[in-house]
Amino acid sequence: MKPPDRNPFGWQRLYEGGEIPILLIRHGQTEWNKERRFLGRSDIPLNAEGKIQAIKLAAALEAIPLTAIYSSPLSRAWETAAELAANRTCTPIPVEGITDLDQGELEGQFGVDLPSKYPAFHDAWKADPTDVRIPGGETLAECAERSVSAIHELLKNHTPGKPVAVVSHRMAIGGIICAALDLPVRYNMVIGQRNTAINLLSYRDHKLTLHRLNDADHLDE
């Protein structure tokens, strides 16, 4: 029987090169994701499919010896991180800065209703979402700034070695990836992130670098 590949994502070459490997992961599916509702700070748990996705994620990463697991404290991320932490010695550590975009008045509403209910906001967001404030919520730029800042802060506790896992949300992850690619924040909207997608990044000299994007091969879909 072939032994499990302990380096399936190429992380070992990163720490050998003096970088900190990071597995940046989106949470599993919720009912609001499935129904295409706006979901930000509402604490919606994983649905049945999301729990299966989290199990598949954990199985895909079981051979990787993680040095730490960080997670947004929202249930959908925390449940995903808890599955990843099962049978490991490390337990998830909550990080407020990587919570999802605050959707304000849009929370729970259907995306298809946005043009009719909030036409001015919809038009401004389509033109350039960077600094457009969601009614009662955040701007995309604010979400990106706090998420990137949180990643830099938590990585201060680490040196090159085993990977660090971070479980977060689509908008927060998009902001971090934009920073790694030196892209304007508005490009967040075109960065794909499937539920439980794995992104491989590295960190050295206060700089993030992206190596793998939106890997969801473990879902077999």
Image (cartoon, rainbow, N blue to C red):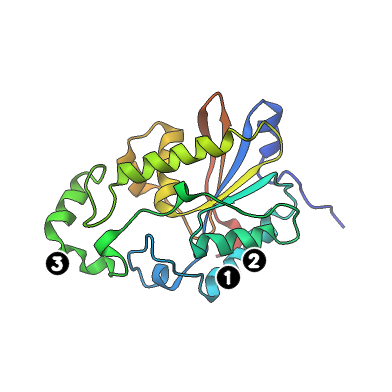
Residue at 60% over, 64% down: 54
- When asked about the image quadrant of residue 43, the answer is bottom left
The amino acid type, in three-letter code, at marker 3 is Ser
Identify residue for label 1: 51
The answer to whether any part of residue 62 appears in the image is yes
Q: Nearer the viewer, residue 92 or 162?
A: 92
Task: Determine whether, in the image, residue 86 is placed left or right of residue 142.
Answer: right
Residue at 36% over, 53% down: 101
Task: Determine whether, in the image, residue 52 is placed left or right of residue 6.
Answer: left
Which element carries disc 2, helix, strand or loop? helix
Identify residue for label 3: 116
- When asked about the image quadrant of residue 39, the answer is bottom left
- The answer to whether marks 1 and 2 mark residues whose Cβ atoms lie closer than 8 Å is yes
Residue extending farthest left: 120
Q: Earlier in the sequence, mark 3 or mark 1?
A: 1
The amino acid type, in three-letter code, at marker 1 is Lys
Residue at 36% over, 46% down: 143
Residue extending farthest right: 1
Residue at 31% over, 41% down: 141
The answer to whether any part of residue 220 appears in the image is no
